[in-house]
Amino acid sequence: MLVLVFCTGYTQAQETNIEHLVQDFQQATNDTARLEVMLKCIDYYYENNPDTALVIAYRSEKLAQKLQNEMFLAHAEREVARLLRRTGDYRNAMAYITRALAREKIIGNKNNISKAHNIIGVLYYEQSNFIDALKHYLHSLKIYEELENKDGIASIYNNLGLLYKEKGEFDQALEHYKKSLEINESLNDSIGLAYGYNNLGVIYRTKGNYKTSLEYFNKSLKIKEALDNKDGIVSSLLNLGITYNKQGLFNDAIEVVLKALKINKPLHNLARESKTYNILAEIYLKMGAYHKSVAYSKKAYEISKKIGNIKIVQEATEIQYKAYKQMGRHESALQFFEITQSLNDSLIQVQKIADLENLRENYEIEKQQIQIESLNKDRIIQQEQIQRQSMQRNVLVVVLTFLAIIASILYKNNRRKQKSNNILTQKHTEIELKNKELARLNQEIVNQNQSISIQKNNLEELNHIKNNLFTIVSHDFRSPLKSIQGFLNLLGMGALSQEETNKLVDDLRTKVEMTTDFLENLLTWARNQMYKIESKPQPVNLKKIAEDNVALLKPVADKKGVKLIIEIHDNFEAFADANMINLVIRNLVVNAIKFTSEGDHIKLSAMREGSKGVFSVVDNGIGIDERILSKLFDLETYSTTGTANEKGTGLGLVLCKDFVEKNRGTIWAESKLGEGSVFSFSIPLTPNSYEIPAKVTTS
């Protein structure tokens, strides 16, 4: 992950010969010339010797204060801020960059104002405050676009890509990375291209395309090695290590990560060093070398705790929890699990504190701006007073005789101006009041229009639901009631034999059971539409729910000669509303039984995909036509018939979709005519769930 804090600094620094800079400094005849050379030296040392760069930045700040040069002072403060950011000292970095921004606003240098907003955005981003980061990035981008500064635009697109990647919006991230890369290619900006290749590699790795990911990381590494950009080399090596680990190439992963650790040591980037130890711990954990995993994660824990990076501390404790758990040291595992959970809560609290800190910092920015503006005004006033006194001394003898006349004229003019100003102020106030009233009335009209539009949409939706509901009820209740009516008429006439009576009773019992199931789904769906039932998630055992439904529906399956199979691990645990998930599974199994024949089987399975579990009901029945498959989960008035002439409306699947989505999940179906169907849904899992071969229960 590479954030572009300064667009061209490193490339310029590489082109600058340090010997020439030292020579220029020694030959400088005044402090202003020396300060200009010192600021160039910061760029030269920024990447490979940041400690030296920071010392020079502090000295530049003091010299600029001595010279009382606002332009150089803002430049020096900006350099201190971006160097402090590298050390993880975000608080002091933010203080310096806010002072620099306030000065640049007074100076009016738009390019430097945009740079300051970019750095502030990076500081917020690295503290996971994505909202404020996005605000400052967009502010910076707007200015760069006005100035047609392609370097600046490319850096902001890169940083926006990183932000969207962290939010999980990978397509948005990829789009911004490619925009940045396109600009850097047109500018032939080597370091910009290296950063772009690196970030594209991260996206493709996240998508599971490791081959393309490695190609981009190696492209980035090659450029950085040619530029001797040590900080960038470390970043590329770590990304290669993470990718090798995901591919199971553990030895290659360890080799490149240890190389990165060695290069990073003299850079004194403690946040990067602690992150590197965590990566090594992850590799050894995956290899089963749990003692080494614990040792490296402890190093990461100690460094990140020292610099106050709670996120890396939380990652280290989570690795130790997993390692101790695999080692069978349950007491230690429990201890680190509790620490991890506590740190998760701390991260939330830190975010709240950060929000408060942001308010304080914004207040400080405004306060500093007011102070600087006040000082400048006082300076201007003093200069004017000096000039006025000098002029008065020179012309005092000449104008002494006319002083009384001039004073009288000035007095009358001031009275007239004051009267005119009062009238203008009064008119201006009246106009402002009228404008406010008009704005208020316009807002009321807008609000009323929005309210009417919302009510119209709600009424149309309710009317659509009502029409579909009446159609379903009239279609699916009339048929069984007509059958019962016909049977009673024949029975009353004595026109049926005992054998015919028994057969009709069995048929009617099946229709009544189906109608009862339909009525239960209909009432549940209607209650959900009317009262908007909320999900009450809690840990639920999916194996237990599956077994309960199989036991309930086994008589129906046995009657059709269909086998029910469960392939779910005993401890497969989801975080969801138990009643809703129970209804979803029951409906899916009932549908599967309806569309299978004697000798077919139905399999209930579950597997883990990331932090979610995917539950599937698989059958080898008659399958579903593509025209029906596309609208299975919509409330449409169509009827389907099972292998034993069972009737259905699809309302149960609509209810399934509602309940799955209320539990932050997704439901879908796959099917081919004559080959069977797969109905699946995903829901969040608890941390205790993990993927191992499932035991099989058949009935």
Image (cartoon, grey):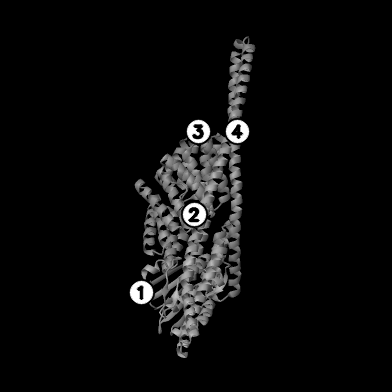
Give the labeled residue for mark 1: 673
Of badges 4 and 3, the one in the foreground is 4
Of badges 2 and 1, the one in the foreground is 1
Of pointers 2 and 1, the one earlier in the residue sequence:
2
Of badges 1 and 4, the one in the foreground is 1
Q: CA distance from mark 2 to mark 1?
A: 64 Å
Q: CA distance from mark 4 to mark 2?
A: 40 Å
Of pointers 4 and 2, the one earlier in the residue sequence:
2
Hey, what amino acid is under mark 2? Leu
Give the labeled residue for mark 3: 30
Nearer-the-camera pick, 55 or 94: 94
Q: Secondary structure at mark 3?
A: loop
Q: How many marks?
A: 4
Of badges 1 and 3, the one in the foreground is 1
* Residue 387 found in image quarter: top right
Q: Position of residue 263 (x, y in %)?
A: 46, 58
Hey, what amino acid is under mark 1? Leu
Crowdedness near tag 3: few (<14), some (14–19) or many (≥20) residues, C-alpha within 10 Å: few
Give the labeled residue for mark 4: 375
Whether the residues at callouts 1 and 4 have beta carbons within 8 Å, the answer is: no
Whether the residues at callouts 1 and 3 have beta carbons within 8 Å, the answer is: no
Of badges 2 and 3, the one in the foreground is 2
Q: CA distance from mark 1 to mark 3?
A: 88 Å
Numbered circle sitting on residue 267: 2
Q: Look at 50% across and 44% down and name the residue there.
A: 116
Hey, what amino acid is under mark 3? Asn
Q: Secondary structure at mark 4?
A: helix
Of pointers 1 and 4, the one earlier in the residue sequence:
4
